[in-house]
Image (cartoon, rainbow, N blue to C red):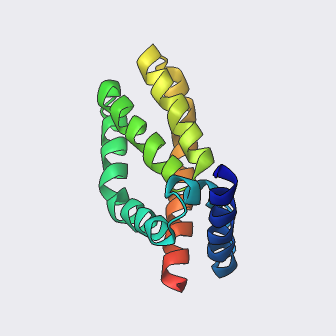
Amino acid sequence: EKKLYQNLWKSVADDIMSEYQFKILDIPMAVEAAEGDKDCVIFLFESFRDNVDKNKADIVSAYEKEDFSNYTIFVHALKSTSKMIGAQNLSEMARKMEESGKAGDFDYIKENYDAMITELDAVVSEISDYLSHR
């Protein structure tokens, strides 16, 4: 049964990847999160794009205020949403940020903050580009 789903999911992933040359997003991962539903993948992309300004502003603001408790909450959310859209690298960066926040390792956060924001911007750019070409 699992095999059947995987085959269906693969054809959905192939379909999406035939529409655009993705460089960042792991489309099979996004399709799996959406349980093989292409419309759901598109919805998750749109939702990520539509909410990113506020979510990024929250992260930036908490970081600049050195409010690491809220920062940790915001990167936790980013970890989950980026995983759902197949932004594996971003999700992993956010996961390490969350762990560092919980551990009080603010040096790690400061050293890796710019890279995470850059990756976030790149992910959003790819999503927006894909959506505008559909």
Question: In the rendered image, which quarter is residue 12 located in?
Answer: bottom right
Q: Nearer the viewer, residue 40 or 101?
A: 40
Question: In the rendered image, which quarter is residue 70 located in?
Answer: top left
Above or below, comparing residue 9 to residue 89 in the picture: below
Q: Nearer the viewer, residue 83 or 36?
A: 36
| Residue drawn where x is 49% and y is 82% of the image | 132
| Residue drawn where x is 49% and y is 23% of the image | 99
Q: Nearer the viewer, residue 58 or 18?
A: 18
| Residue drawn where x is 49% and y is 63% of the image | 124
Horizontally, residue 112 falls left or right of residue 68, namely right
Q: Nearer the viewer, residue 11 or 97?
A: 11
| Residue drawn where x is 29% and y is 54% of the image | 54
- Asked if residue 130 shows in the view, the reply is yes
Going by the picture, which residue comes out furthest to the top? 103
Going by the picture, which residue comes out furthest to the front? 1
- The x, y position of residue 5, in whole percent, is 62, 58
- The x, y position of residue 11, in whole percent, is 67, 70
Above or below, comparing residue 52 to residue 100 in the picture: below
- The x, y position of residue 4, in whole percent, is 66, 59
- The x, y position of residue 56, in whole percent, is 37, 50
Q: How many marks do you count on the picture?
A: 0
- Asked if residue 104 shows in the view, the reply is no
